[in-house]
Amino acid sequence: AQKVTQAQTEISVVEKEDVTLDCVYETRDTTYYLFWYKQPPSGELVFLIRRNSFDEQNEISGRYSWNFQKSTSSFNFTITASQVVDSAVYFCALSEVADSWGKLQFGAGTQVVVTP
Amino acid sequence: DTAVSQTPKYLVTQMGNDKSIKCEQNLGHDTMYWYKQDSKKFLKIMFSYNNKELIINETVPNRFSPKSPDKAHLNLHINSLELGDSAVYFCASSQEPGGPYEQYFGPGTRLTVT
């Protein structure tokens, strides 16, 4: 069963608009880690953030921000004032400590298209 | 000074052939992984090695065989290639197994089976 759900397949925005990517996860572990990766058109996977299950503080890094809510099992990602270079597929991933030896379980990804 | 490198970047071959993909990391990490990304961009773990020992072996056809000659290398050999094996294969490494450790990905190998 899919443990990470990214319900938005594709989001199209015009440059400078904000865009929020949803990520809902499912786990029985009390200790787990959540990640976001970016895959630009060139194909490589770029690490963006890691968050552990005990740290619910929101995080901001430049135009990127993340909202982690354990109550709703969500770890959403917002790009503020989007730019064309933000066009990519964004993956949310879960790593469960009890089970997985660190394997990343990815969501299906959300394609973000930013047009000028 | 590439952290995780894969060769080749592109691989086009015919059904039934045997091929290998090589991965090397120069980060001094203990753990390496193979992931497969299908045509719909879905990423799934295949294998993981920690200090040359297999620790993750997902449900993968036994035509796929990973080999780790040392901690810095993890190769993927595929026998009797099938059309459905066409995908992008990513190698990754992390300091140790487990969630606290970020995984660094290689550039991927696009395999096309005709």
Image (cartoon, coloured by chain):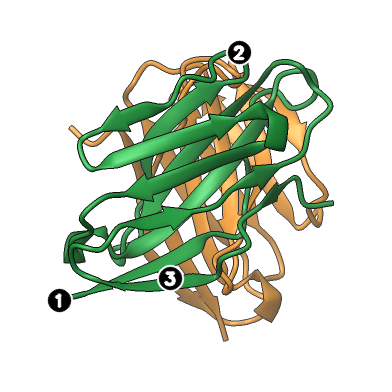
Chain that the image shows in green: A
Which residue is pictured at 31% across the width and 60% down the height?
A40
| B102 or A74, nearer to the observer | A74
| B69 or A76, nearer to the observer | A76
**Identity of the amino acid at label 2?**
Phe
| Residue at the spot of label 1 | A116
* CA distance separating discs 2 and 1: 39 Å
Q: Quadrant of residue B56?
A: top right
**Quick check: B40 left or right of B106?**
right
| Residue at the spot of label 3 | A11
For residue B42, say whether it is visible: yes
| B7 or A93, nearer to the observer | A93
**Identity of the amino acid at label 3?**
Ile
Q: Position of residue A49 (x, y in %)?
A: 40, 32
**Of callouts 3 and 2, which one flags the residue occurring earlier in the amino acid sequence?**
3
Which residue is pictured at 61% across the width and 60% down the height?
A108
Identify the element where label 2 is drawn. Answer: loop
**Identity of the amino acid at label 1?**
Pro
**Of callouts 2 and 1, which one flags the residue occurring earlier in the amino acid sequence?**
2
| Residue at the spot of label 2 | A54
**Quick check: B108 left or right of A23?**
left
Q: Which subunit holds the residue at mark 1? A: A
**Of callouts 3 and 1, which one flags the residue occurring earlier in the amino acid sequence?**
3
| Chain B rendering hue | orange
* CA distance separating discs 3 and 1: 14 Å
Identify the element where label 1 is drawn. Answer: loop
Q: Which subunit holds the residue at mark 3? A: A
Q: Position of residue B104 (x, y in %)?
A: 40, 33
Q: Position of residue A106 (x, y in %)?
A: 61, 48
